[in-house]
């Protein structure tokens, strides 16, 4: 009987447990079917949203391109994903030597670790230009990854400049750019046109590949000049770029590849490895389908670009962001040019261009001639060459008091107003004059001038050469920006007549070298004549001083600046390096420090 009661209790307990489980299952099922709260619906993402105004992206600032060579190892080990990316290979980075791989790894780590933010900025810029560059290179049979060379050159910045005077996405020197169809004058600088310069870069790279039959050597020649690479190959018997690096010590000091060139190809290879592995490396890959759709428009000579921008509802910064090649508010008066406009502005732009008589003279200012004025004085005051003033005003040079002159404005000239009216006495009286303080400073600086700006000069390069700073030169010369014009006179504080003579001598020597190189039909990249005879890409002509000893002249004590070498100082003063060493009882391996004093017997 007792056993029966125990079994009955056990059965009742099992039934109760089974009932609890059933109720729990029902509760869970009910909860699963209940409507969910506080979970927002997934919103579709609009691809490539275009703002109503279709305003252009902000124009990139003019920045100086200087590369850390070689970058230091940060000591941080690579992750498995980074190792996989580093080990990936493409058309241009197969079978690297251990030494080459070490340098590639340094650049790879630099861009993925310490300079990651910089690389992300380059990627963002690439969205605007890389699709076009790829298409141009594809049409000419150039490997697609060569397009990444623009990252090494400028980080896709159309306004990038080098201390030597190279400019644009592809860092063309003026002479080389003009050789490949890029105009460079007071009105515009097509090296900064990201679309036209891409075609010029493709032409030049294709020519270099035809010269060497090897892409690594072609890339090195893009940096150093084809003459430099050709002579180095001949002097070492090297078979390829990395073999040339190993045998670089066989060349004398002048012929050796600089560190920048020796690291140039490894840097490019590292960039290519990163670009083909963006997602695995944690970078946000740009959506290249969202590249701006710009339409090229052919404009007539002397088109008022400021008025065109206003007709499209843009300010100058918007227009300049899409058209960085224009240095003035007016297109060149002697040639047709191309402007790039957004598709939604095409109708307004065409309407404006079809009715040039209705232009508002927005890109001009009106100047009323005063007593004692000359075209030369007005040109200096307004920063406009006399030849330009004569051309746009159809003037023979004679002026009369009260006469109105049209002065073309420029995006980098703060003394011009964007609201200047048409040429009338009313507009002339309303035109904004130069600020008195800056105008007086410029007048004083011109009278005390110790330096004349040469083609390719930059304010940064001049400041560095003269041991000064950009800010100091701006204050001393009443400059609000960094733009310079060929022939402009600058006052360099603490630079007297002796410094002026030196600057002129070195500029003349550089010019003679370029003329001699051009007359020999040398196809190498030519150095821009600048005050500091720094080594720049394409410098192939030997200075005159290296070919013949200069006569002994007056003794000058030169104070060594940061980055100076005996070779650079010799080029600066147009004297043979061996004479410079002899005058100072130094051997060719002597190390110079900033502040050292060097005696130079400058030629008379």
Image (cartoon, rainbow, N blue to C red):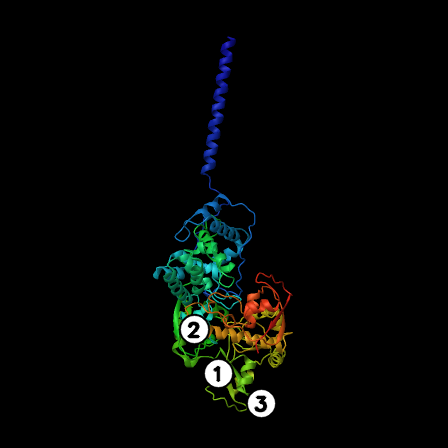
* Position of the C terminus by quadrant: bottom right
Q: Which mark, residue 313?
A: none
Q: Is residue 562 visible?
A: yes
**CA gap, disc 2 and disc 1:** 26 Å
Residue 14 vs residue 487, the one in the foreground: 487
Circles 2 and 3, Cβ within 8 Å, touching? The answer is no
Q: Position of residue 229 (x, y in %)?
A: 44, 61
Q: Counting other residues with Cα less than 10 Å from the Cα at mark 3, is it few (<14), some (14-19), or many (20 or more)?
A: few
Circles 1 and 3, Cβ within 8 Å, touching? The answer is no
Q: Which mark, residue 372?
A: 3
Q: Is residue 327 visible?
A: no
**Numbered marks: total:** 3
Q: Position of residue 201 (x, y in %)?
A: 41, 64
Closer to the chain start, of discs 2 and 1, is: 1
Left or right, residue 506 beside residue 175: right
Q: Position of residue 157 (x, y in %)?
A: 48, 63
Q: Is residue 424 above or below residue 520?
A: below
**CA gap, disc 2 and disc 3:** 43 Å
Q: Residue under label 2, please give it.
A: 518
Q: Counting other residues with Cα less than 10 Å from the Cα at mark 1, is it few (<14), some (14-19), or many (20 or more)?
A: some
Q: Position of residue 352 (x, y in %)?
A: 41, 76
**CA gap, disc 1 and disc 3:** 19 Å
Q: Which mark, residue 387?
A: 1
């Amino acid at each position: 009987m007792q056993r029966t009661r125990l079994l009955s209790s056990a059965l009742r307990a099992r039934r109760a447990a089974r009932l609890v489980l059933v109720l729990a299952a029902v509760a869970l099922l009910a909860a699963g079917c209940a409507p969910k709260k506080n979970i927002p619906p997934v919103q579709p993402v609009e691809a490539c949203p275009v703002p109503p105004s279709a305003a252009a992206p902000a124009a990139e600032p003019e920045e100086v391109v200087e590369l850390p060579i070689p970058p230091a190892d940060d000591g941080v080990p690579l992750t498995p994903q980074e190792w996989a990316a580093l080990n990936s290979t493409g058309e241009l980075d197969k079978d690297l030597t251990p030494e080459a791989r070490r340098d590639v790894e340094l650049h790879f780590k630099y861009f993925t670790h310490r300079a990651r933010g910089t690389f992300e900025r380059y990627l963002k810029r690439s969205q605007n230009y890389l699709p076009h560059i790829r298409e141009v290179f594809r049409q000419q049979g150039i490997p697609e990854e060569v397009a990444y060379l623009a990252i090494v050159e400028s980080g896709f910045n159309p306004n990038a400049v080098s201390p030597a005077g190279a400019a644009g996405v592809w860092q063309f020197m003026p002479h080389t750019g003009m050789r490949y169809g890029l105009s460079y004058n007071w009105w515009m600088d097509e090296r900064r046109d990201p679309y036209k310069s891409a075609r010029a870069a493709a032409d030049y790279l294709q020519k270099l590949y035809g010269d060497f039959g090897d892409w690594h050597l072609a890339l090195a020649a893009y940096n150093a000049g084809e003459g430099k690479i050709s002579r180095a190959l001949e002097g070492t018997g090297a078979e390829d770029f990395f073999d040339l690096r190993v045998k670089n010590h066989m060349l004398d000091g002048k012929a050796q590849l600089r560190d920048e060139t020796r690291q140039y190809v490894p840097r490019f290879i590292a960039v290519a490895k990163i670009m083909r592995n963006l997602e695995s490396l944690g970078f946000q890959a740009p959506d290249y389908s969202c590249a701006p759709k710009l339409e090229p428009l052919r404009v007539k000579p002397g088109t008022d670009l400021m008025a065109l921008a206003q007709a499209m509802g843009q300010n100058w910064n918007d227009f300049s962001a899409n058209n960085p090649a224009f240095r003035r508010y007016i297109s060149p008066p002697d040639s047709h040019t191309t402007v790039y406009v957004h598709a939604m502005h095409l109708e307004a732009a065409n309407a404006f261009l079809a009715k040039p008589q209705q232009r508002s003279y927005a890109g001009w200012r009106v100047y009323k001639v005063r007593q004692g004025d000359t075209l030369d004085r007005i040109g200096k005051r307004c920063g406009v060459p006399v030849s330009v003033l004569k051309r746009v005003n159809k003037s023979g040079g004679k002026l009369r008091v009260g006469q109105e002159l049209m002065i073309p404005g420029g995006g980098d000239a703060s003394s011009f107003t964007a609201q200047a009216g048409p040429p009338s006495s009313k507009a002339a009286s309303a035109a904004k004059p130069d600020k008195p303080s800056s105008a007086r400073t410029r007048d004083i600086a011109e009278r005390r001038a110790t330096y004349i700006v040469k083609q390719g000069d930059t304010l940064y390069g001049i400041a560095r050469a003269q041991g000064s700073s950009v800010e100091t030169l701006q204050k001393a010369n009443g400059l609000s920006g960094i733009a310079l014009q060929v022939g402009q006179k600058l006052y360099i504080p603490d630079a007297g007549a002796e410094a002026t003579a030196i600057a002129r001598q070195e500029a003349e020597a550089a010019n003679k070298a370029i003329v001699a190189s051009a007359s020999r039909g040398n196809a190498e990249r030519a150095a821009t004549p600048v005050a500091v005879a720094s080594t720049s890409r394409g410098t192939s002509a030997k200075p005159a001083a290296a070919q013949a000893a200069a006569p002994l002249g007056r003794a000058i004590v030169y104070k060594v600046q940061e980055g100076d070498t005996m070779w650079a100082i010799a080029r600066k003063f147009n004297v043979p390096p061996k004479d410079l060493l002899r005058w100072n009882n130094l051997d060719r391996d002597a190390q110079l420090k900033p502040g050292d004093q060097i005696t130079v017997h400058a030629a008379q």
